Image (tube, rainbow, N blue to C red):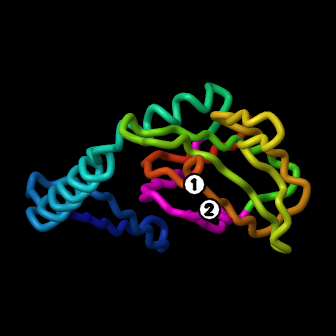
Amino acid sequence: MNRACFTQTILKLKYSTCELHHTNKINYTMMKKSIITLAFLFTFGLLSFGQVTDPLISNCAINAGANARYLKDFRIQLGKTASQSELRYKANMSLWKNTKYRFTMCNAQDSKGQLILSIKDESNKLILSSFDKKTGKIFSFIDFECQKSGIYQINYDFTNGQQGSGVGVVSMIK
């Protein structure tokens, strides 16, 4: 852009006015920066959306239900164990008070045992389990309404210490 200024004198007073006029010159430096920025954003967008997801995780997240919002997944792969005193896969997760969570467990086809879950609080007290010891029933998902914010221990294993692989998906219920 070019700027043109005019000065006029009327009755011994000077008035100055300036106008901007567009030129037809192309600013190649600015165009090059714009093209590089767009190319970077396009490449970044393709990389972030082009990731391949595990079908077991995808199916398990879908099984959580339409009212569930995916938060995190745990990929569990364990070999057979001779004795099982505690669940072998352990992870810590921060849960918030007055929030309802859904924990969904899914097994891979080649698993010998069925995936089970237990949740313990900061004092290592059992809060919830997907395995009912009295009836022997295993639930494929459990809902948990958190009463106290804190770090909870999420434990997974396969029934009777069997080998297997599976996924645990944590979702928030809307």
Image: magenta residue range: 70-94
Quick one: which residue is furthest to the top in this view?
66
Which numbered disc covers residue 84? 2
Q: In this view, does 82 lie to the left or right of 126?
A: left
- Picture coordinates of residue 124 (x, y %)? 81, 71
- In the visual, does 6 lie left or right of 170? left
Residue situated furthest right in the rendering:
147
Residue at point 71%, 43% (across, down): 130
Amino acid type for the residue under numbered disc 1: Asp
Going 61% across and 32% down the picture, which residue do you hit? 64
Quadrant including the N terminus: bottom left
Q: In the image, is residue 55 above or below residue 152?
A: above
Left or right of 20? Residue 57 is right
Left or right: 5, with 170 as reference point: left
Label 1–label 2 contact, CB within 8 A: yes
- Above or below: residue 115 compared with residue 121: above
The image shows residue 84 at horizontal and vertical percentages of: 62, 62
Q: Which amino acid does label 2 sit on?
A: Gln
Q: Which of 138 and 25 is in front in this view?
A: 138
Q: Residue at x 23, y 50 (%)?
A: 42
Distance from label 1 to label 2 (Cα)? 9 Å
